[in-house]
Image (cartoon, grey):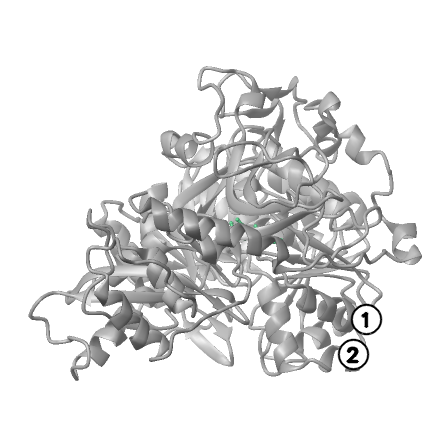
Amino acid sequence: MTDKSNVDEHTEASEAQIAVHWKEEQYFQPSQTFIEQANMTDPDIRQKFGEANFPDCFKDYADMLTWSTPYTKVLDTSKPPFWKWFVGGKLNASYNCIDRHLAQYRNKAAFIFVGEPEQDPPVAMTYQELYVRVNEMAALLRDFCGLKAGDRVTLHLPMTLDLPITMLACTRLGVIHSQVFGGFSGQSCGSRIQDSGSHVLISTDAYWRSGKLIDHKVNADIAVQTAEKLGQHVDKVLIWQRYPGKYSSPTPMVEGRDFFVNELLQKYAGKQVEPVPMDAEAPLFLMYSSGTTGQPKGCQHRTGGYLAYVAGTSKYIQDIHPTDTYWCMADIGWITGHSYIVYGPLLLAATSVIYEGVPTYPDVRRPWRIAERLGVNIFHTSPTAVRALRRAGPEEPRKCGHHFKHMTTVGEPIEPSAWRWYYDEVGKREAVIVDTWWQTENGGFLCSTIPALDAMKPGSAGPAMPGIYPVIFDDNDEELVKGSGQAGNMCIRNPWPGIMQTIWGDDQRFVDTYYKRYCKDPQSKDWRDWPYMSGDGAMQAADGYYRILGRLDDVINVSGHRLGTKEIESACLTVPEVAEAAVVPVMDEIRGRVPDVYVSLNAGSTGMPGSGASADVVDRVIKACEDMIGKIARPRQVYIVPDMPKTRSGKIMRRVLGAISNGLAVGDVTTLANGTVVEEIRVMVQGKHAVASTDAIPEDIAKFGQHD
Ligand code: WT7
């Protein structure tokens, strides 16, 4: 920190405001009908998962799985923070998700696929059919691609049945899947191929989005070229077809490299592949996520602990029974979809709905029509989707005939007014709501109410999950008193089975990112000395409920998904005229946060502020963000500034730009090297009149850029 005086002043103001940002809300109770059927009704559950019973309490979750070799030790802490869970145990993920259900549920739907075009009827895939397809695909991956346990494969698939079939086929062989969100660009996919060392890319020709059949094969070509440039050769590209037997992309196939999955599968019709028993600690998949530096990190999740944790949390928190029809309207390309569309529901033999398209296509009633038609009784979505559906059609859900017993929200803080609309209108006051806080790194929920046991409180994620012991540190690294209502850095004191194993190929970054700051003794073998740092701000109310206040690092949460400011800045810097780039989060009514971009240009470049060429630079900066990351990274605004506000030591003051973008006062800038430019930028963005905001400022916005 180079600018201490400003920082302190800023911090004090924000802490006080945070405490009043959202008022404490009244409680809502679950209905008797819900409680009577709930999976978890034991009032002693948190005590049973209390520290006195740690780590053995997690046997309860491991018992929900079928092990081919039983584990001998629940937790090994001999090499902190590289915990080992269910040591010595062996199991296979696809066996647990499919084979073991066949005797009882062979002809029950595992998935129901709903394509975006509404005239296409939903397609139900039974557990038996899933078994057949996964076996055939596993045979193809093994015999045609030569893949074996421990190899990595990159998937860049949209929301169709091909995605879980491919994932489960990988796990049958012990192959580590790395699914890249379908909406990410070819270049994003390519850098993840390189990082994971995949030789095979599995993609698709096309998929539907907002009424358009989008060419996706083109991204496969870009991904392979990008990986190649970075030094990773891809031998084979497997292309699923949105309409089997018909190629729906204008992008040509590359002879000898690209193959249609449907054609190859003919050779493997009816083939069966023995599920390979995998060590509990064998990596199951990688999920890339953004961090504070440019390069996304491959969160590596283990087989045994991860599956146990998602089974347990799906059962107790999602309240999934085999008889339920469950719809999580997230994308499988994010961790939410891995844990709570594919693995969790399937481990519990439920029926999980996969919807291809956007929730508001062709109109805002679409989700409620789908729910009614399929008899969905558990619904799971993000605050962003709740806000968007509310804005477009506040009266629509009540006109529709769906009935939910349970609803989930995840990904961002949900403001009490949006929560109440979700409860009153979508849930029709019949459904319980769980506000689940967790992260890509965590495997499953860390904070949530237990739906039949805890009252709901809008705006609060609820108490910690059973077996999760949080602690909040203040800015001086002191533990805050439990229930103090003070904001601080949210940490988890203990290991849990769903925590990632490491960052793929970068153990040091794993330690540095999550454990270094609060580690009490780097030599210690005691887990109590190794709190996990989440990177979120939070406060705990007197009733023990946690309110999550948002990211405290250089990460922007857009629609519940993480983007690194540094990642977006490096995309901007690929535009030749751009000399410097700074990305800041801006509050957005629907999407929570969106990025604003500030760029200064190289001397002599034609796109100087106000010149005709500047519009062209702006367009190319936007395009660079979309091409290198994906449409989700599209900036709200790109401002070309004459110079960046900087400290005397030359650091860009992102904090100042963040304040300007959010319509806030910039505070004292007299210590900056070039203070006068601040007013110039402020006028450019906010207009001539100073904006004196008296609203409470969310923690992440208030603190953004302070650690620069
Ligand atoms: C970040 C993690 C795994 C969930 C999907 C996003 C924010 C997540 C909540 C919630 C307030 C939340 C946090 C977290 N977040 N859930 N219920 N209330 N904030 O996964 O992309 O890894 O992002 O999302 O800031 O750190 P992710």
Residue 32: x and y in percent read 93, 55
Q: Residues within 10 Å of mark 1 (few under 14, many from 20)?
A: some
- Vertical order, 357 against 158 (above or below): below
Image point 61% across, 53% down: which residue? 19
Image point 76% across, 65% down: which residue? 376
Residue 375: x and y in percent read 79, 68
- Vertical order, 78 against 585 (above or below): above
Q: Quadrant of residue 366?
A: bottom right
Q: Is residue 110 left or right of residue 385?
A: right
Q: Name the residue under label 2.
A: 398
Q: In which quarter of the image is the N terminus?
A: top left
Q: Residues within 10 Å of mark 2 (few under 14, many from 20)?
A: some
Mark 2 is on which residue type? Arg
Between 545 and 308, the residue placed more toward the observer is 545
Q: In this view, does 324 lie to the left or right of 159?
A: right
Q: In which quarter of the image is residue 94?
A: top right
* Callout 2: SS: helix
Decide: marks 2, 1 in contact (CB < 8 A)?
A: yes
CA separation in Å, label 2 and label 1: 7 Å
Q: Name the residue under label 1.
A: 428
Ranked by sequence position, the earlier of labels 2 and 1 is 2
Mark 1 is on which residue type? Lys
Q: Is residue 225 left or right of residue 72?
A: left
Q: In this view, does 658 lie to the left or right of 546?
A: left
Residue 85: x and y in percent read 60, 26
- Count of numbered marks: 2
Q: Residue 84 carries which label?
A: none
- Vertical order, 474 against 68 (above or below): below
Q: In which quarter of the image is residue 96?
A: top right
